[in-house]
Image (spheres, rainbow, N blue to C red):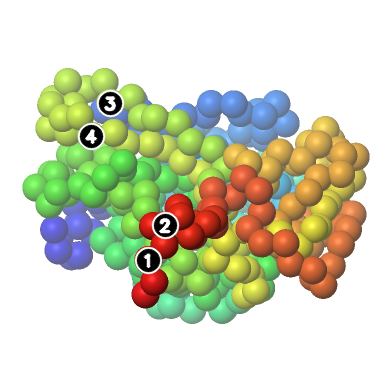
Amino acid sequence: MNEKLTYQQVQDYYGQVLQNSSDLKTDACCTDEGMPAYLKPILSKVHDEVLVRYYGCGLVLPEELDGARILDLGSGAGRDVYALSALVGAQGQVVGVDMTAEQLAVANTYREYHAEAFGFSSPNTTFHQGYIERLDQLRLEPASFDVVISNCVINLSPDKQAVLSQCYDLLKPGGEMYFSDVYAERRTPQHLIDDEELYGECISGALYWNDFINLAKQSGFKDPRLVKSRPLAIENPALQAKLGDRRFYSATYRLFKLDDLEPACEDYGQAVRYRGTIAHHPDKFVLDGHHVIETGKMFPVCGNTYRMLAETRFAPHFEFFGDWDTHYGIFDGCGTELPFAESATASGGACC
């Protein structure tokens, strides 16, 4: 599938074929599973026309957003942009990018409506028509965003490496890409990628998960962190027949722009203690699936996790213990163990 054809097919599918979320044939792009209570009154103020044109997957809701500048890739009719605009407040800004004219027409219709609904004197939202692989053409200032989000969109891109690299360039040092997308358990063959329906349903364009990890690292995001995931239920018999026994997952990742992150979780004897001061998270802070940090509890961390908390917008909410003076090897539980035999007999005693 060439790039030009991909753009046209996706634009047609999301601009003309799909008219509301009920037109989707899988649950790959729609779930509000686990929606926090504080978000419900915000979404209740989002205009109905915006809500019915929502096709996202997962709940893209990073923490600590007051005053932040956020970029939403594939913003569609603007549901996430408007919800986040309430959370960043009048001093923050949310910028949406989408290539589909029909979706952007809906989004732009309600900028003033949502500013008034959330009590702002003027809109703190902006929308651009463009391609997420070509963000450099939109004249967005490099290193100007605190957070980049995306909701089930990157799988639709024909050049995922370009998306990740340009997001890295647009983030401030210490900024974060926080996004949900669809991933495959293995690489998808070309005949399935070329299937317009499977591609439009956010299935066959999904990256093999390990290819994503490697692309993220090549783009500068040295330690991708999986926040949560779920298997996709493809209940449409015709689509399932095409896919056979292939499995797909919806997953949310954090990617931090931090230059000094290491390739593995190195142990320096450090620890953090969460103050419980992030809004709506008084009892614990979930950095990722392996780091659920309870309020007031001393929590040992590797050097990368230490930096993800100490050199980002989360720093004021933690106490930090330890330094970089002593290195103890790979952090326990990292999944990387010493690969060498512990004795000469274990390796057969051969020399090189």
Q: Residue at x 54, y 55 (%)?
A: 342
Marks 4/2 in contact by CB < 8 Å: the verdict is no
As measured in the structure, the alpha-carbon distance from the residue carrying label 3 to the one carrying label 2 is 47 Å
The three-letter code of the residue at mark 4 reads Arg
Query: Dot 4: within a 10 Å radius of its alpha carbon, few (fewer than 14), some, or many (20 or more) residues?
Result: few
Marks 2/1 in contact by CB < 8 Å: the verdict is yes
SS label for mark 4: loop
Q: Earlier in the sequence, mark 4 or mark 2?
A: 4
Q: Nearer the viewer, residue 299 or 116?
A: 299
Front disc: 3 or 2: 2
The three-letter code of the residue at mark 2 reads Ser
Q: Which residue is mark 2?
A: 347
Side of 77 relative to 90 (left or right): left
Query: Dot 1: within a 10 Å radius of its alpha carbon, few (fewer than 14), some, or many (20 or more) residues?
Result: few
Q: Earlier in the sequence, mark 3 or mark 2?
A: 3
Instruction: Kindly identify which numbered label has been placed on residue 246.
Output: 4
SS label for mark 1: loop
As measured in the structure, the alpha-carbon distance from the residue carrying label 1 to the one carrying label 3 is 52 Å
Q: Earlier in the sequence, mark 4 or mark 3?
A: 3
If the image is split into quadrants, where does the N terminus sit? bottom left
Side of 102 relative to 167 (left or right): left
